[in-house]
Image: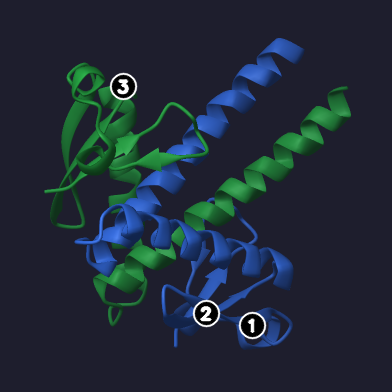
Chain colours: A blue, B green
Amino acid sequence: MILLGFSQNRSHFYFGETEADPLSESRKNKIAVEIYGRQYVIVGDESESHIRKVAAIVDEKMREMKSRNPSLDTAKLAVLTAVNAVHEYLKLQEEMEKYKYKKD
Amino acid sequence: MILLGFSQNRSHFYFGETEADPLSESRKNKIAVEIYGRQYVIVGDESESHIRKVAAIVDEKMREMKSRNPSLDTAKLAVLTAVNAVHEYLKLQEEMEKYKYKKD
């Protein structure tokens, strides 16, 4: 199982296994989730519901991709899920910039 | 090589290989990118610079994760990159909702 940490600084993240601070670590949420048939423990300051929501979205997107293209292996499915998630993020960021500009 | 399509509807995406419309497909950008040592062709209405930016971010995040946790295989690295990208997306979405609420 893997420990994945979400840092509070949104532009960075870290793995609990390698950068954990034992004192603050004990107060973090550690949530076991299943994504595309594999177990992960996600560690972070985020709420359990947020962590579960993120895992469920990734799982769903990977299954959706697999059903559309059954020949893809897990690594490629996950890379393309990441590609799409980053794409969505950048589009939302652009939208937010436009919105701010319009409102200001 | 894989054909990944970005649809114009931001809530969905599709693979060019399975859902391509041959007529509109010929007008789309087809960009070959390398992500974590594997070749992908990303097909979509987005600009070449946007597609390259997305691929570069995913590649960079996967390399960053690998350097922090060398034992992870490619599939897990990619899943965790997707997890983090979806996390960032949801946080930005929350931020945007708050911003809209404050402004209205």
Query: Which of the pair A42/B19 is nearer the observer?
Result: B19
Crowding at mark 1 (Cα within 10 Å: few <14, some 14-19, many 20+): many
Question: Which chain does the residue under circle 2 lie in?
Answer: A
Q: Which mark is residue B47?
A: 3
Check chain identity for marks 3 and 2: say if they share one: no
A33 left or right of B91 in image: left
Q: Amino acid at mark 3?
A: Ser
Q: Amino acid at mark 2?
A: Gly
Q: Which mark is residue A30?
A: 1
Crowding at mark 3 (Cα within 10 Å: few <14, some 14-19, many 20+): few
Check chain identity for marks 1 and 2: say if they share one: yes
Question: Which chain does the residue under circle 1 lie in?
Answer: A
**CB under 8 Å between discs 1 and 2:** yes
A41 left or right of A85 in image: right
Q: Quadrant of residue A26?
A: bottom right
Whether residue B24 is situated above or below residue B32 in the rendered picture? above
Place of residue B74 in the rendered image (x, y in percent of width and height, measured from the top left): 25, 70
* Residue at the image position 34 percent from the left and 73 percent from the top: B76
Give the mark toward the camera: 3 or 2.
3
Q: Residue A104: in sight, yes or no?
A: no
Q: Which mark is residue A53?
A: none
Q: Quadrant of the N terminus of chain A?
A: bottom left
**CB under 8 Å between discs 3 and 2:** no
- Find the distance from the CA under tag 1 to the CA under tag 3: 39 Å
Whether residue B27 is situated above or below residue A15 in the rendered picture? above
- SS at mark 3? loop
Whether residue A28 is situated above or below residue A1 in the rendered picture? above
Q: Residue A88: in sight, yes or no?
A: yes
- SS at mark 2? helix
Residue occupied by mark 2: A16
